[in-house]
Image (cartoon, rainbow, N blue to C red):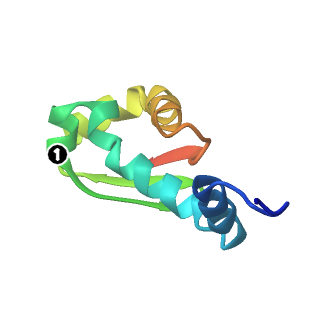
Amino acid sequence: MRSSNDQKLGDAIKEMLKLYRLDDKIDEHKLIRSWEQAVGALVARHTKAIYIADRKLFVTIDSAVVRNEVLYVRTKIIKDLNELVGAKVVDELVLR
Protein backbone atom coordinates (compact mmCIF):
# COMPACT_ATOMS: atom_id res chain seq x y z
CA MET A 1 0.00 0.00 0.00
CA ARG A 2 1.33 3.46 -0.93
CA SER A 3 1.41 6.25 1.58
CA SER A 4 0.28 9.74 0.68
CA ASN A 5 3.81 11.19 0.62
CA ASP A 6 5.18 8.80 -2.03
CA GLN A 7 6.57 10.45 -5.16
CA LYS A 8 8.58 9.47 -8.17
CA LEU A 9 12.36 9.40 -7.81
CA GLY A 10 12.86 11.92 -10.62
CA ASP A 11 10.47 14.36 -8.98
CA ALA A 12 12.24 13.93 -5.64
CA ILE A 13 15.63 14.63 -7.22
CA LYS A 14 14.32 17.75 -8.97
CA GLU A 15 12.84 18.96 -5.69
CA MET A 16 16.14 18.33 -3.88
CA LEU A 17 18.14 20.18 -6.56
CA LYS A 18 15.80 23.14 -6.30
CA LEU A 19 15.92 23.06 -2.48
CA TYR A 20 19.73 23.16 -2.45
CA ARG A 21 19.79 25.64 -5.37
CA LEU A 22 21.82 23.29 -7.55
CA ASP A 23 19.51 23.43 -10.56
CA ASP A 24 20.98 26.80 -11.60
CA LYS A 25 24.51 25.39 -11.52
CA ILE A 26 23.43 22.42 -13.61
CA ASP A 27 21.87 24.76 -16.18
CA GLU A 28 25.08 26.82 -16.27
CA HIS A 29 27.10 23.66 -16.88
CA LYS A 30 24.73 22.61 -19.69
CA LEU A 31 25.04 26.05 -21.28
CA ILE A 32 28.85 25.97 -21.25
CA ARG A 33 28.81 22.47 -22.77
CA SER A 34 26.44 23.74 -25.50
CA TRP A 35 28.85 26.51 -26.59
CA GLU A 36 30.26 24.63 -29.59
CA GLN A 37 26.79 23.60 -30.76
CA ALA A 38 25.60 27.23 -30.63
CA VAL A 39 28.60 28.92 -32.27
CA GLY A 40 30.14 26.23 -34.47
CA ALA A 41 33.48 24.45 -34.54
CA LEU A 42 35.56 27.41 -35.79
CA VAL A 43 34.59 29.76 -32.98
CA ALA A 44 34.81 26.93 -30.43
CA ARG A 45 38.37 26.17 -31.59
CA HIS A 46 39.39 29.79 -30.89
CA THR A 47 37.64 29.86 -27.50
CA LYS A 48 40.21 29.64 -24.72
CA ALA A 49 38.11 30.21 -21.59
CA ILE A 50 34.41 30.32 -20.81
CA TYR A 51 32.61 30.84 -17.50
CA ILE A 52 29.42 32.34 -16.07
CA ALA A 53 29.17 34.93 -13.28
CA ASP A 54 26.14 37.03 -12.32
CA ARG A 55 24.13 35.81 -15.35
CA LYS A 56 26.91 37.02 -17.68
CA LEU A 57 28.76 34.64 -19.97
CA PHE A 58 32.46 35.54 -20.14
CA VAL A 59 34.30 34.17 -23.17
CA THR A 60 37.97 34.56 -24.06
CA ILE A 61 38.67 34.26 -27.77
CA ASP A 62 42.25 34.23 -29.08
CA SER A 63 41.51 35.71 -32.51
CA ALA A 64 40.48 39.33 -33.04
CA VAL A 65 38.71 38.45 -36.28
CA VAL A 66 36.63 35.69 -34.67
CA ARG A 67 35.92 37.88 -31.62
CA ASN A 68 34.63 40.63 -33.95
CA GLU A 69 32.35 38.17 -35.77
CA VAL A 70 30.94 36.92 -32.45
CA LEU A 71 30.28 40.51 -31.39
CA TYR A 72 27.94 40.98 -34.35
CA VAL A 73 25.80 37.95 -33.47
CA ARG A 74 26.03 37.89 -29.67
CA THR A 75 22.30 38.44 -29.07
CA LYS A 76 21.49 35.46 -31.30
CA ILE A 77 24.13 33.36 -29.51
CA ILE A 78 22.62 34.21 -26.11
CA LYS A 79 19.14 33.32 -27.39
CA ASP A 80 20.35 30.04 -28.92
CA LEU A 81 22.26 29.01 -25.79
CA ASN A 82 19.30 29.70 -23.51
CA GLU A 83 17.03 27.72 -25.85
CA LEU A 84 19.45 24.77 -25.90
CA VAL A 85 19.40 24.65 -22.11
CA GLY A 86 15.67 25.25 -21.85
CA ALA A 87 16.01 28.06 -19.30
CA LYS A 88 17.11 31.68 -19.21
CA VAL A 89 20.62 31.22 -17.79
CA VAL A 90 22.53 34.23 -19.18
CA ASP A 91 21.50 37.74 -20.11
CA GLU A 92 24.77 39.08 -21.46
CA LEU A 93 27.84 37.91 -23.37
CA VAL A 94 31.18 39.51 -22.48
CA LEU A 95 34.07 38.92 -24.88
CA ARG A 96 37.70 39.18 -23.92
Instruction: Report x, y in % for residue 31.
Output: 43, 47
Residue 56, picture quadrant: bottom right
Label 1 neighbourhood size at 10 Å, few (<14), some (14-19), many (20+)?
some
Residue drawn at x 58%, y 54% is 10
Residue 94 in the image: state x and y as whole percent: 45, 50
Between 5 and 58, the one nearer to me in the picture = 5
Mark 1 lies on a secondary structure that is helix
Report the residue at 40% width, 27% height from top: 72
Q: Quadrant of the N terminus?
A: bottom right
**Frontmost residue, 12 versus 58:** 12
- 39 vs 19, left or right, is left
Instruction: Give the residue drawn at x 33%, y 42%.
Output: 35
Q: Which residue is mark 1?
A: 46
Which residue is nearer to you in this view: 85 or 72? Answer: 85
Quarter assignment of residue 41: top left
User: With 38 as the anchor, is 42 left or right in this view?
Assistant: left
Specify whether residue 28 is in view: yes
Give the image location of residue 30, x and y in percent.
42, 50
